[in-house]
Image (cartoon, rainbow, N blue to C red):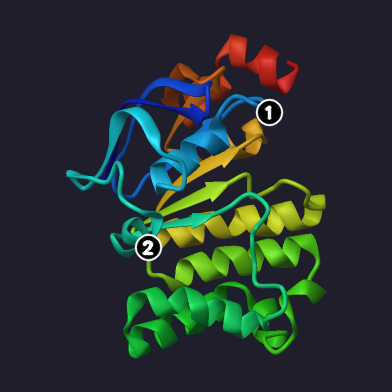
């Protein structure tokens, strides 16, 4: 589904990604793990078109999307849940969700997706008339994921979904990911919580200093001695 070939990008004169190559097959949960500053969020932004690539390419289902604006990429079936969530805090929960559904330009499909999001996160339905800014960090993360799902994505990019959340909210968010995947949505998960992320993953990649240094199935990586010492303290 997603094919990244020799991708490089950065900020001004600072190169962050250096020749990244990886693939994501339809139906997979693929995790990108690494320390702070490894380039994980930069990778998501480059895939989504909010940060231009300086070299290499990104293709979705065989179609090159490198250089396309983010709104066009979204219409091709990729949705991003950004680090920091970026909600419309002055708007209600339901209005935030409906804005996500506007991408579809199909009222029936948007309504069906809204019903599913409310099923997935009942608290959003209970509090749908509240302003987004009244939510806790964990509740805002649920709303951000719900808004992304409203677009009807084929591929969901999750950028650090656990950051800043209380442990119980991290558990709530992560337990929903298999259910989202079971609906036919491929998941590309960028996360510092190595244990949790790789436990969910079909496959994973380890990113260090803007380069892929290790890859394999989630379970293979969790059994790797170098990774266990570096990231799990075992």
Work out whether 25 lies above or below 71. above
Residue drawn 17% across the image and 44% down it: 62
Contact between marks 1 and 2 (CB within 8 A): the answer is no
Q: Looking at this view, name the residue that lies furthest to the top.
A: 226
Residue drawn 55% across the image and 78% down it: 97
Image spot of residue 164 (x, y percent) = 78, 48
**Residue 4 visible in the current orientation:** no
Which of the labelled discs sits on residue 36, or is there none? 1
Residue drawn 51% across the image and 43% down it: 189
The image quadrant of residue 91 is bottom right
**Residue 3 visible in the current orientation:** yes
**Along the horizontal axis of the image, is 93 left or right of 49?**
right
Q: Which-is-in-front pick, marks 1 and 2?
A: 1
Mark 1 or mark 2: name the one nearer the start of the chain.
1
Work out whether 174 lies above or below 105. above
Work out whether 203 lies above or below 81. above
Give the quarter of the figure containing the N terminus: top left
Which of the labelled discs sits on residue 153, or is there none? 2
Residue drawn 67% across the image and 36% down it: 193
């Amino acid at each position: 589904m997603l094919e990244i070939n020799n991708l490089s990008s950065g900020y001004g004169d600072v190169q962050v990604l250096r020749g990244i190559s990886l693939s994501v097959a339809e139906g997979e949960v693929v995790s990108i793990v690494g320390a702070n500053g490894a380039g994980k969020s930069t990778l998501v932004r480059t895939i989504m078109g909010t940060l231009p690539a300086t070299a290499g390419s990104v293709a979705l289902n065989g179609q090159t999307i490198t250089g396309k604006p983010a709104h066009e990429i979204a219409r091709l079936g990729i949705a991003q849940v950004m680090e920091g969530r970026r909600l419309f805090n002055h708007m209600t929960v339901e209005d935030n969700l409906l804005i996500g559904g506007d991408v579809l330009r199909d009222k029936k499909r948007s309504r069906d997706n809204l019903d599913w999001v409310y099923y997935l996160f009942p608290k959003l339905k209970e509090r749908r008339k509240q302003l987004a800014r009244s939510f806790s960090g964990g509740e805002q993360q649920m709303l951000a994921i719900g808004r992304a799902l409203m677009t009807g994505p084929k591929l969901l990019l999750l950028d650090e979904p656990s950051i800043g959340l209380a442990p119980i909210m991290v558990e709530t968010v992560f337990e929903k990911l298999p259910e989202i995947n079971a609906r036919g949505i491929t998941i590309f998960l960028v996360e510092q919580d190595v244990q949790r992320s790789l436990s969910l993953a079909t496959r994973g990649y380890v990113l260090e200093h803007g380069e892929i240094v290790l890859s394999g199935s989630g379970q293979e990586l969790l059994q790797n001695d170098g990774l266990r010492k570096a990231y799990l303290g075992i």
